Image (spheres, rainbow, N blue to C red):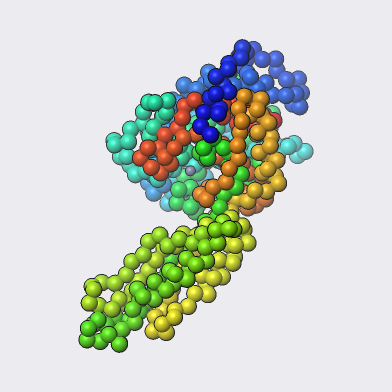
Amino acid sequence: MPGVESEHLGRRRPEMSLKEMPMPAAPDLPVPMRALLAGARRKQSALLDLTRQLVRAESPSDDKAAVDACIAMAVAQAKALDGRVKLHRQRGFGDVLEARFGPKTKAGDAKPILLLGHLDTVWPLGTLKTMPCRLGEGRLWGPGTLDMKAGVAMAFTAVEMLAEARLLQREIVLLLNSDEEVGSPVSRPITERLAAGCAAVYVLEAAQGLAYKTARKGTGIWRIEVQGVAAHAGVDFEKGANAIRELARVVETVSGWTDLKHGLTVSVGVAGGGTKSNVIPAEAWAEVDVRIARKADGARIERKFAGLKAADKACALAVTGGINRPPMERTRGTQKLFRQARALAVELGFALEEASTGGASDGNFTSALGIPTLDGMGAVGEGAHARHESIVVEHLAPRVALLAALLAG
Ligand SMILES: [Zn+2]
């Protein structure tokens, strides 16, 4: 529903600045919503500047030096906001940043909130030359704007607003990783360990349309290799065992496991094999993408892949892979977080929807641990991983205000 937020926000009310607001005497007093919104609007250009700075530090997951340079900017920002910074050093990937804001959690306090994001992108170095970071048509364009440098800038802005309004009453942990786009191999254990000590996880990935995400599918990747027997297709046909024919049969089998009704999909994305048309191929292979909506389907599908057998006894199968991210199921805890967010959005003047997606994020890991997780709390825009990647500027302020309100609540 494009335009919902802006429509409501068009009716501007008299605004007080954050600093003029009477400070709440007790933490259970309502959060000053209109002041938060006004504060977010005043910070919009600084937020855009920070986003631009992060986008101009190109940071493909596979380039440690480049990702580290981008992470260094986030470290500087966290320190400027009095964050307690810890870098989790990595060898093969960029370092992972943990920054803590607000009072340290003591025994008996409410547990911290985890803000989760990543600073790596899918874009190689040099992309900015043909896809520059620029403002135009009400959007900020460029590689990594939507996925998810604007979301990271939004997190910093929300923390800054709360600190200025003295609403930072519980500890906030910001975790920015360096390897999300390649499956979070090194950051996953850090994410899981920090999430386990937190009351809730807010993921700053891009919105789904205008909606927050309360469910995501889990993902799996498999590789299937078929070993057959090569032979001259004319002279020795009967001595050969055709690996491509065998692979075709396997592709048909695994594709048949798709169960759309239950959100299970199996898709062979790449395949190859053979050498020359007159040679019976000895080798063939395929890579398979699997998505699951229900946790239980993970083990089920893993068993099925493990049980694959060649129909042609002269062929051998080698099957590797597994479920990489469990699904983020729409748990009660997540639904409760969403209801809070929706109620606060109404006070800010817009209707917040909830959505589910087939794409996975690090929210899948935290949700699978049973920690209430809200996702898609970052920027609104289009074109993640695509040439037209961009964020819509007018949605930044209301969503930062909402994030701040949730963190204060
Ligand atoms: Zn992302």
Image spot of residue 148 (x, y percent): 47, 38
For the residue pair 222 and 240, the one nearer the viewer reads as 240
Residue 282 higher or lower than 51, as above or below? below
The structure residue drawn at horizontal position 27% and vertical position 85%, both measured from the top left corner, is 237
Image spot of residue 288 (x, y percent): 44, 62
**Quarter of the image containing the C terminus?**
top right
Image spot of residue 16 (x, y percent): 62, 13
Image spot of residue 323 (x, y percent): 53, 60
State left or right for residue 21 relative to residue 398.
right
The structure residue drawn at horizontal position 48% and vertical position 78%, both measured from the top left corner, is 309
The structure residue drawn at horizontal position 34% and vertical position 44%, both measured from the top left corner, is 124
Residue 327 in view here = yes
State left or right for residue 144 relative to residue 112.
left
Residue 401 higher or lower than 320, as above or below? above
Residue 366 higher or lower than 44, as above or below? below
| Number of numbered callouts drawn | 0
Residue 86 in view here = no
Residue 248 higher or lower than 92, as above or below? below
For the residue pair 103 and 383, the one nearer the viewer reads as 383
The structure residue drawn at horizontal position 70% and vertical position 40%, both measured from the top left corner, is 336
